[in-house]
Amino acid sequence: MNKKGILIVLSGFAGSGKGTIIHEVLGRYDNYALSVSATTRAPRKGEVDGVHYFFKSEEEFKEMIAGGELLEYANYVGNYYGTPRRYVKEMLEQGKNVILEIETEGALNIKREYPEAVLVFVMPPSVEEIHNRLVNRGTETDEVIEKRMKKAGFEITVVDRYDYLMINDVLSESVELFNAIVTSQQMSVSRNRDYINDKKKEFEEYLNRKKEN
Ligand code: 5GP
């Protein structure tokens, strides 16, 4: 069967709980890798450089763009965010399913360049819940929360270009559903052409041997 990893893009409104789903997926299954993005956003309390993000100045970020180091990048509410190319490539070649936790513009760019990427959108159970989760997280000012809510209002308009939708209500169920999406993709005929061709050849050889005998 298909040995190469699958590129999975997970997007969702701020407060959708997508980060928690990813954390649980990485803890539960060993065939996933999470890409760490570069950003010009300032670290939040508790965020560690190289773990949550690679924190960059705008100048450093632009150098990464110019050097072709990013698979995609986008500007989100005033800051740049981008996916370093090399790690993703290496992990896919090792057979890991690589998760990119990125916003919609970057996601659609990935889909354009890598049509085989799987785009998953996570939503909380209600719009009110999005706002509540952002407020309860306590990491953002009211102004930034309003900007992120506005952005969410735009992001909902591009969800129909994604492949899968998940409503994140019960976390353990979301984790299993996420893995089910990826597993079913691994079993798809389109990702297993080489395997199928090998089997066709084996059959031909077998039937030829039978004829000879
Ligand atoms: P936050 O500031 O809350 O960590 O992230 C803001 C938004 O940027 C989220 O929707 C997150 O998924 C997205 N994001 C994080 N890393 C990347 C990236 O490498 N590329 C793009 N396009 N978006 C990203």
Image: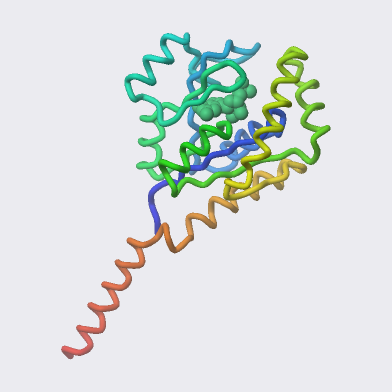
In percent of width and height, residue 57 lies at 47, 9
Residue 86 left/right relative to 162? left
Name the residue rendered at 38%, 52% in the picture.
3
What sort of colour scheme is used for the picture? rainbow
**Quarter of the image where one finds residue 170:** top right
| Relative to 5, residue 133 above or below | above
Q: Is residue 130 above or below residue 44?
A: below
Instruction: Tell me the residue at 56%/16% (across/down).
Output: 79
Could you say where residue 38 lies in the image, as x and y percent from the top left? 48, 20
* In the image: residue 11, left or right of residue 70: right
Residue 143, how many percent across, how many down?
74, 14
Q: Quadrant of the C terminus?
A: bottom left
* Front one among 89 and 41: 41
Q: Is residue 213 left or right of residue 111?
A: left
Residue 189: x and y in percent read 44, 63
* Residue located at (57% from left, 50% from top): 163
Q: Nearer the viewer, residue 191 or 68?
A: 68
Farthest residue to the left: give it: 212
Residue 77 vs 19, above or below: the answer is: above
Q: Is residue 96 above or below residue 141?
A: below
Q: Quadrant of residue 191?
A: bottom left
Question: In the image shown, does 213 or 147 lie closer to the viewer?
Answer: 147
How many numbered marks, from 0 up? 0
Of the 4 image quadrants, the one containing the N terminus is bottom left
- Ligand 1: which quarter? top right
213 sits to left or right of 105: left
The residue lying at 47 percent from left, 39 percent from top is: 98
